[in-house]
Amino acid sequence: MKKSTIVASPLAFLLVGSLAIPAVGGDLVGTLKIVSSLPRTGSANAQTTSIVNGIRMAIDEVNGMVDGYTIAYEDWDDASPQRGNWDPAVEGENAKKAARDDEIIGYIGTFNSGAAKIAMPILNKAGLVMISPANTYPGLTKPGLGEANEPRVYRPSGTINYFRIVPTDDLQGAVAADWAKELGATRVFVLHDRELYGKGIADVFVHHSKEIGTEIVGAEGIDTKASNYRSLCTKIRATNPQLVFFGGTTQTNAGQIVKDLRGAGITVPFMVPDGCFENAFIEAAGADNVNGSAYITFGGLPAEEMTGRGAEFVKAYVVKYGIKPEAYSAYGYECCKVLLEAIRRAPVKDRAGILKAVSETKDFDGALGVWSFDANGDTSNRTLSGQTVKDGKFAFVKVLGRSDAPAVSPAATDAAK
């Protein structure tokens, strides 16, 4: 690792797209850099800005300094204007750039599970720790719950360097199916966006729905670039569903689907996963189309339901930024806190030492409660929640969760891309 003595004034750290906080007192040993790779272009920006704010808060809390090292942070975009969402080419370049820069000791990302598939093997070969605040596709870490070569294909070095602090879709998809049945839906039409995350969680929903006796009256992938889904809604209406489930995100046209369902006179509940748990979803769908009729699952608790350190984080966030944090803000904050604590504990402040310290994270007492990483790099936290929309705003409904959530067969996610 390169080491450099910092002699610049604080003004030198005011860099566009990055945050480097000058040390306060003590001897300066060098710089350790943390980067995040998230979609900062397009409608995901509000959610990812909240994540970045959380990361910056964590660094502020240590005054930008750990054991004599200045902690520099850079906010990278993995989206492109052409796609308006994450872009495989951009994410690949971000991962390669991080791998080449030996001052970088931590990579926070990605937001999208499909983006993680691209970055993971590149960063694994470089021995660079990667912690995601939002990836939920099971195959990234869990053998038997994805394609036949997963997760081995993401670990070419044989060492696990990828971790995530959010419960996975094999849990979320199952509790969504349970909740749909609890809401009285015994006939469900399932849609998905054909992407890794969206189709994966839809497959889990379908798999568990059949296990609990819910009839799946139709299942289709959509064209996420379509201007409308009127003909599809005509088909859905003919099946007389009691609920429509969409596996996808705000960015893959969830809002337009809701508009067209309501335009076709389909007023049944519309259920979506955490990829739509952002204000942009309500704005895209139109509040009148989702008030009291949209249900959203999330791998955690919303800001207003957090307690202990989580509640302290929310309060501090509101004071600092003047707004309530979006759903994944606390997860960005927690990712960075884990990295900073690993830096503190690592005897040698290089990639290998910090990676080892992250892997040994046990009983971490943070904003998300007390949790640990397991042998696959997954969190022990299994808390999920359900939300609806009231008066144009998200409203907490209940804690969801299944300690015995079933595993999904490999075939259920083989087609997920």
Image (cartoon, helix red, strand yellow):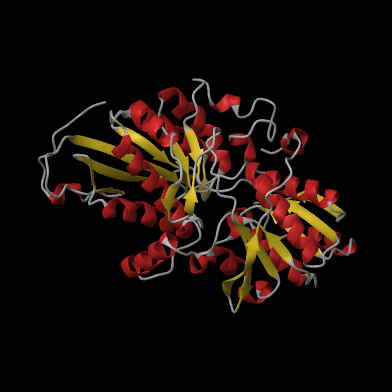
Q: Quadrant of residue 317?
A: bottom left
Q: Where is residue 2 shown, x and y percent of the image? A: 23, 27
Q: Where is residue 299 shown, x and y percent of the image? A: 58, 54
Rendered-image quadrant of the C terminus: top right
The residue lying toward the viewer, choosing from 72 and 193, is: 72
Which residue lies at the image location 53% right of the left edge and 66% below the top edge? 279
Single out the residue that lies furthest toward the bottom. Answer: 391
Q: Is residue 61 above or below residue 341?
A: below
Which residue lies at the image location 49% right of the left edge and 55% below the top edge? 42
Classify residue 151 as left or right of residue 205.
left
Rendered-image quadrant of the N terminus: top left
The residue lying toward the viewer, choosing from 385 and 279, is: 385
The residue lying toward the viewer, choosing from 240 and 146, is: 146
Residue 345 visible in the picture: yes
Which residue lies at the image location 28% right of the left edge and 54% below the top edge? 61
Q: How many marks overall?
A: 0
Residue 41 visible in the picture: no
Single out the residue that lies furthest toward the front. Answer: 363
Classify residue 271 as left or right of residue 127.
right
Q: Is residue 252 above or below residue 340?
A: below
Q: Where is residue 403 shown, x and y percent of the image? A: 67, 49
Q: Is residue 338 above or below residue 178?
A: above
Which residue lies at the image location 78% right of the left edge and 72% below the top edge? 267
Single out the residue that lies furthest toward the top. Answer: 157
Q: Where is residue 55 shown, x and y percent of the image? A: 36, 51
Classify residue 267 as left or right of residue 395.
right
Q: Quadrant of residue 250?
A: bottom right
The residue lying toward the viewer, choosing from 411 and 240, is: 411
